Image (cartoon, coloured by chain):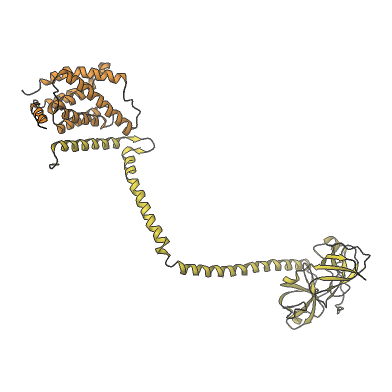
Amino acid sequence: MELGAVIEQHIEVHKFRAGSIAAAALLALLLQSFLPRYIHRASLLELPLLITVYFGLSRRNPSTGLLLGTIIGLLQDSLGHSPLGLYGIAKTIVGFIASSIGTRLDTEHPLSRLSLTIGFFVLQQVVLTLTKRIILGLAQPFFSMQLLAAALINGVIAVGLFMLLDRLRRS
Amino acid sequence: MAALPSRHRSLVLLAAVVAAQVLLLAVQIKRERQGRLIRVWSVSLLSPFERAGVWAVDGVRGAWNRYIGLRHTREENQQLHADLERLKLRNIELESKAAEVERLEGLAGFRQAHRNVPMVAAKVIGSSADSASKTIYIDRGERDGLKRNMAVITPDGAVGKTVEVFRNTAQVLLITDRESGVGAMFAGTRIQSPVGGTGEALVMKYVSNDDKIAVGERVLTSGQDRIFPPDWPVGTVVEARPASPFQIVRLKPLAHLSQLEEVLVLLTTQELETRKEPEKAAAAPKLKVRPAAPAPH
């Protein structure tokens, strides 16, 4: 217990400039709905997820992380045709787990960010698939090559995006 | 919430937020044929309780009806038994009335068919107190024009003759009485022989052993007794065997003598047209009026 307490003491809780989280989330949602109209491959991107993961890992407060995930997910739902709550549930869980992991792991290393993002992407897909299957009654595959590719692409993009977002931190 | 540790607080919050969104989804989703998902879930959630409630209410009601509610069952049962007995009696009464109506219809039809023959319908009101004699009492007497030695019949066949006539009643000697005698003949061969009673059946007394008599042959009145009109059914042969000096020929009366309730008293010996042998009746003379005379005993 003492060792754990020591490790937690060394993990920094980052703070961001006022409005930067909201601005980043809104921009991610805007791009998410805007880019695929012009770039077909952009539909593989999950920018709202990346924002949720990043701020969850950085803020390291599960309650804040899950509420941020909820808000971003519901907004994402409202911008699309999916029923409200589909992405909301997934991102709530992702935000909660990201915040919880952030209190225990060093999430600053690019490889760590890459693997965590891929993991969260897969987690989101699992939650989405379960929700679609159980609640919506839709036949949805758990795995496909396209999902794997999307997970890798989002992981790679997350490494760069997170470095950009690091600039929003208050020093 | 304030009492919960921070880690648990976020878990509770997670559960609450996820549950709220699941409900939000359920409100939006409409399953085919089942309506909105929230309704499906609500029904699925509540229906077990409803079923349990119905089961409990039915159980209580059943227990009440089967045990506590049976307090008055004994009285009801007795009442129902009494009703059943009363209805049985009523049923017997109605059946009897229906049979009576049927018989009266038969008599009425018979009278209608013989409108020109004077006759009186009478009800059997009693029978002989003496078991050795076969007599009945009818509710017609002198006031109705009855006299002694008048033929008493039913549409089925000969019954007997009046032997005592009072003001309002008359005594009828049945053809099965030992003292009775009817002038008769075989329907087919027209062989004549008087028919007498034995107490139960009828016998033809003087049939020669040379005459071939078939079982089942019909025997009719011959008119020789000057009481019964000719050609009226008397009985059918049930036994015919040679004997000395005459054959023994036993007959079964065609009239249901043991079940008589209504009879017809002929006020004349005018010949009647029988329904059972219309061709013979048509061939026979329609009207033969003879003066009524005492019959040989």
Give the answer, above or below, for where A70 lies relative to B261: above
Chain shown yellow: that is: B
x and y percentages locating residue A21 in the rendered image: 13, 26
Chain shown orange: that is: A
x and y percentages locating residue B240 in the rendered image: 86, 65
Question: Which picture quadrant has residue B231?
Answer: bottom right
Identity of the residue drawn at 38% across and 52% down: B55
Is residue B122 shown left or right of residue B43? right
Question: Can you say which quadrant of the picture contains the N terminus of chain B?
Answer: top left
Residue A30 showing in the rendered view: no
x and y percentages locating residue B177 in the rendered image: 80, 76
- Looking at this view, is A158 or B103 the one in front? A158
Residue B38 showing in the rendered view: yes
Which residue extends farthest front? A2
Give the answer, above or below, for where B145 lies relative to B103: below
Identity of the residue drawn at 42% across and 67% down: B71
Which residue extends farthest right? B210
Question: Which picture quadrant has residue B276?
Answer: bottom right
Question: Can you say which quadrant of the picture contains the C terminus of chain B?
Answer: bottom right
Question: Which picture quadrant has residue A1?
Answer: top left
